[in-house]
Every structure is written in C-alpha cells, then in structure tokens.
Image (tube, rainbow, N blue to C red):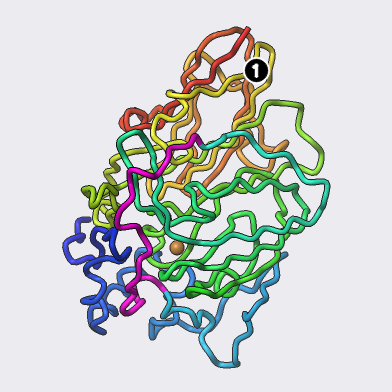
Amino acid sequence: MDDTNDRPGASVRPDTGITPAASAFDAPSTRRAFLQRASVLSLAIPGIGAALASCGPAGKSGGAGTAAAGASQAPGVPRNPDSRLDTALHAGAAGATTPTSGAASVAYHRFDPALPPLSSERTLRVHFTSRAAPIRISDDTVVAAWTFEGDTPGPIVHCRAGDTVEFTLTNDADMPHSMDFHAAQINPKVAFRSVAKGQSVTYTFKPRYAGAFLYHCGTAPVLMHIGTGMYGAIIVSPAEPLPPAREFVLVEGEMYLGPAVNGVRPFDYTKMLSTLPDFVAFNGRPDQYARDPIHVKVGDRVRFWMVNAGPTHPCAFHVVGEQFDTVYLGAPPGNAIHGVQTFEVAAGGGMCFELVCDVPGEFPFVNHAFGHGQKGAIGYLVVDA
Ligand SMILES: [Cu+2]
C-alpha cells in the first residue's frame, strides 16, 4: 500500500516542533479523512475515537489499575474526551518544543544499560515530565527529540510483579503527550489520555506478569510520538528472584531524520511512514556499545531485558559467538526455551535473554536483520578474564 502522498505528516520543524502541514490539517474534511484512515490503520490509540462519528462510548473497563486525577467523565460523554489534544488535531500547536540553536553545546552521554536495583518498597512512585530536548546521538548528530525526562529512551523503571506503581506524567511541552505502560492492565481511554502543557495525569497499576515491557507516549499519531523518542522500558522482575546475573536493558528504536536545521536534525514523519530508518539504535544512540562496550567477567550469567520500541520493525536479537542458554518468551521464569541462536522481538514487545559467559572475548550483540544492524543496532559484550 502506498498512500503516503496525502498523509498529513511531514518533517517536524526544529523551530516549532510541529509539522508544516499542521495548519492545513485543521480543515475538517482533511481531518476527518485522516481520522478514518487512522482508524483503519489502528493508529487511533487513546483519544482519536471520540472524533469519529461511528465510535460508540463502549470500552473495556480497567483491570488491576485505577485512574485518577481528573479522569472523571460526565455520563453520555464519549470516553475519550481528550481527542482534541491529539497532536494531529491540535490546532495552532505553535511553540518551541524543540531547540533552534545550541547544538554544539549538547553533550553526548552513554545511556547506562545496567538494570537499576529494585526498591525495598512495594509501592513505586514514578513521576515523569514530558518535554522536548536536543539529544546528541553521536559525535556529529544532534536530534530534536520529544522525551520523557529529557532523554530517549526515558528512564528505566524496575519493579516486581504484584508491586504497585503510582505513575504521574506532567507535560511541560506545548505538544500534548500521554503515557501508555504495556505492563499495566487499565482502561487506556482514561489512564493513557493526552494532557496539555502544564497538566498532569496520574494512575496506578499492579503489573501482573514479569517481563520486559515497553512504555511510550500514546498520543496520536502514535507513530510520530514513539518515532520522535517518547519511549522506554519498564522491567518487571518475578516475585521469586531469577538466578543471580549481570542484568542489562536494551531498548531498540528506529530513527527517521530530516536534514539538520541550526545543527539539529528533526524527526521526519513522512520517513516514518516510509519505514526506511536512517538509524536503528540500542538505547537511543547508534553503535554506542560498539564505541563503549558492556563489560562482564568470565563465568557471569548475563541477562538482557530486550524491549523493542519500533515503531515499526522487529529486532532479531543475536549474540555473535554465543548462544542463549535461556530465552523467556514472557512472564519469566515461565515460557523458557533453551539453546537459542536468534529470537525476534516484535515492535511493541519485550523478552528476556540469558547467556553464560564461558570464555573471554568480544561478543557483538546485534539485530541480525543486518540492514538494521548496519544502521546502528550493534554493540559489544566484552567478557574479561
Ligand atoms: Cu507524545
């Protein structure tokens, strides 16, 4: 299917953070046409359905989670009252959500892949702020990202199955944003709704299953918000600890970029639709663990919690010169398979990969779909004697 020519998206301008086509998109006929297409394409995650005349008020009620902080709705009102906050519908969303200059002053930092330790508390309070931020992804490239907490990926969240997560998102960007935790079972039309600048949304959930889960902004078009950097990992350890290991988190993400403006490359929505990325990276920086490897010691068990943010492509995870002793397909310690060379993690999915480092050496870990490995989804696991 190639119907990209009439899509509303275009390069996100670094000076405004909005698509040049946004004003034209305000026209009701254009907007409605997009909504209909988005519905067909299942782009319409939270919010967009209310704008569709055919969308009824019924929705699956929440599971273990509860939503609060302004989540109440009047009877008879469609269940996704924030639809007008969706990016594509946000009329006149002017505002400096991305920088106009200063790329040279943006420092590079390696994203620490180490899994943070668990808290002794069984209730985790997490407060993220969404904001635009320039990110240096390599010596010569700064990108105009939309972020949680000023980085992409956002911070790694770590809890146990059955813990309580009390989450608040405060939006400090002119663009509306939201938060969708894949570890939650909750009414998304309420909890995952978009919030405007200066507003917050709070909800509480209890992860039922252990695993590596994605979180991401769910504001429509979701492709643009994930594609512009609004994603991260929540790692849910099982209630009974897994065997001791060196634990690392890798979040794969694709990057679709336009030409630099004032030294900053914007994210390009039309390219996202084309699905041909410029870079594919583990933890937001192409090749970062090739430049600055992950070190372990002989005899270590290594556990990679691998999350694929996409937004589009799968990740064929493989470690050159090694085999995975165990891959947990979901809900570790259940669903284990053994003696695995490569396993594919779907976009929007996550898995747990384990290997035992029997011999010293430098072991590349890659997306073995090498068109994407070559674009930056590669790093080194160095096993020191
Ligand atoms: Cu967003």
Task: Identify which residue is drawn at 82% across, 39% down.
Answer: 240
Residue sitting nearer the eye, 87 or 240:
87
State the extent of the magenta-drawn residues as a range.
86-110
In magenta segment, residue 94: yes
Q: Position of residue 314 (x, y in %)?
A: 42, 41
Q: Which quadrant of the view contains residue 140?
A: top left
Quadrant location, the N terminus: bottom left
Seen in the picture, residue 276 relative to 150 is either above or below; the reply is above
Task: Identify which residue is drawn at 64% across, 48% down.
Answer: 157
Seen in the picture, residue 214 relative to 69 is either above or below; the reply is above
Q: Position of residue 2 (x, y in %)?
A: 19, 56
Task: Identify which residue is drawn at 48% across, 73% down.
Answer: 197
Q: Which quadrant of the view contains residue 9?
A: bottom left
Residue sitting nearer the eye, 99 or 31:
99
Q: Position of residue 70 (x, y in %)?
A: 62, 81
**Main secondary structure of the magenta stretch:** loop
Residue sitting nearer the eye, 333 or 109:
109
Badge 1 is on which residue?
356
Give the structural element (helix, strand or loop) at label 1: strand
